[in-house]
Amino acid sequence: TAKSHPFLARGRRLVALQRWDAAEADLKQAAALVPNDYRPLTALADCYLKQGQIAQSADTYQAALALANRAPGNQQFGRSLEMAIASSSALLDELQSRQPQAAIWWRLRAMGAAQRQRWDEAAHCLATNDSHWSHAVQLAIVRAIQQDPAGARSAYERLNQLLQVDKSKPA
């Protein structure tokens, strides 16, 4: 990472200055120097996103997310990367168009809606793909925020169903 640091730092500064071509070149160089580090890819994806290059941004964010989630101890960085993705509706639209049923995009869309305190939208996203226990937990929380006890109870019942299925699977 020491070799890539100057390119990464300068690339980020160039993004802030909207010098896209130079920023892209430096960030690509940083990524080439450390191919197993998600940070240059994240900065490059951000560069593409700020230019409105949604498809390229989506490709690069997916690669960065895969790297962040693969490396031991990087789960927290993966979460911050997910938050960055959740903040862009256009990016989420692109990613979800590629994998319409992927649970992660529904969860991230719900996170973005919750950040904007759009609780009905967050609840809809979580309820649309509730096949994972974490979605049921998040939906119960959203329903509690909405002061909807029946909805929270229903989400907790779904959570119990999902946990029972997990217990029945062989380890």
Image (spheres, helix red, strand yellow):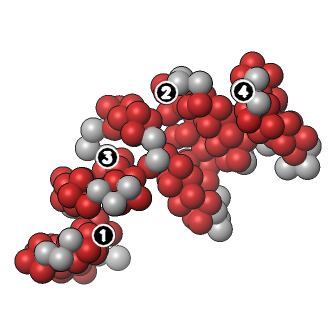
Query: Which numbered disc, 4 or 2, marks the residue that appears first in the sequence?
Result: 4
**Inter-mark Cα distance, 1 to 3:** 17 Å
At which x and y percent is residue 71? 64, 58
At which x and y percent is residue 8? 81, 40
Which residue in the protein does label 1 denote? 138
Where the C terminus falls, by quadrant? bottom left
Q: Is residue 166 visible?
A: no
Q: Residues within 10 Å of mark 3 (few under 14, many from 20)?
A: few
**Residue 69 location, quadrant:** bottom right
Picture layout, residue 137 above or below residue 18:
below
Q: Residues within 10 Å of mark 2 (few under 14, many from 20)?
A: many
**Inter-mark Cα distance, 1 to 2:** 28 Å
Disc marking residue 54: 2
Which residue in the protein does label 3 denote? 102
User: Which residue is located at x 49 percent, y 27 percent?
Assistant: 54
At which x and y percent is residue 149? 12, 80
Q: Nearer the viewer, mark 3 or mark 2?
A: 2
**Inter-mark Cα distance, 1 to 4:** 37 Å
Q: Nearer the viewer, mark 4 or mark 3?
A: 4
Q: SS for tag 2? A: helix
Q: Nearer the viewer, mark 4 or mark 2?
A: 4
Relative to 8, 136 lies left or right: left
Q: Residues within 10 Å of mark 1 (few under 14, many from 20)?
A: many
Q: Which residue in the rendered view is the most extreme toward the left?
A: 150
Q: What amino acid does circle 3 point to?
A: Ala
**Residue 164 location, quadrant:** bottom left
Q: Is residue 16 visible?
A: yes
Which residue in the protein does label 4 denote? 18
